[in-house]
Image: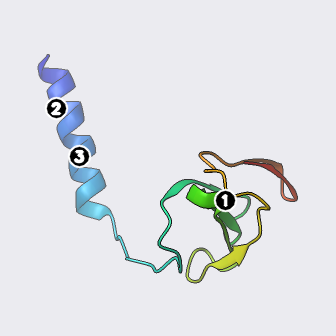
Amino acid sequence: MKKIFLLITLLLISVFGFSQWTILTSGTTNQLNSIFFTSYNTGYVVGNNGTILVTLNAGATWLVDTSGTTNNLNSVFFTSADTGYA
């Protein structure tokens, strides 16, 4: 039990002690539900009301992409750099 407590404590210290979080603006007020990066710079976010956002610069800015639906998109996954599923 002491080993588990020590392991969890060390994990939390490493997560909170060394993390450098930065708040970024997504450009949408819709709830965002899932994110997937196909490379270091290129990533996709999906959310409610058919929201799809794309970044080409590691999340510094986000562009709106058209999904063609108003359904909530809860997950996103890519099998290759140009084939993805929401």
Q: Position of residue 81 (x, y in %)?
A: 84, 58
Q: Earlier in the sequence, mark 3 or mark 2?
A: 2
* Label 2 sits on residue: 6
Could you tell me how many numbered marks the image carries?
A: 3
Q: Quadrant of the N terminus?
A: top left
CA neighbours of label 3 inside 10 A, class few (<14), some (14 to 19), many (20+): few
Q: Residue furthest front?
A: 70
**SS at badge 2:** helix
User: Image quadrant of residue 82?
Assistant: bottom right
Is 81 left or right of 60, judged from the image as shown? Answer: right
- Does any portion of residue 47 appear in the rendered image? no
Q: Position of residue 12 (x, y in %)?
A: 23, 46
The residue lying at 16 percent from left, 32 percent from top is: 6
Work out whether residue 64 or residue 79 is closer to the camera in this orientation and state it.
Answer: 64
Q: Is residue 63 above or below residue 48?
A: below
- How far apart in space, not on screen, are marks 3 and 1 (Cα)? 35 Å
**SS at badge 3:** helix
User: Which numbered marker is on residue 86?
Assistant: none
Q: Earlier in the sequence, mark 1 or mark 2?
A: 2
- How far apart in space, not on screen, are marks 1 and 2 (Cα)? 43 Å
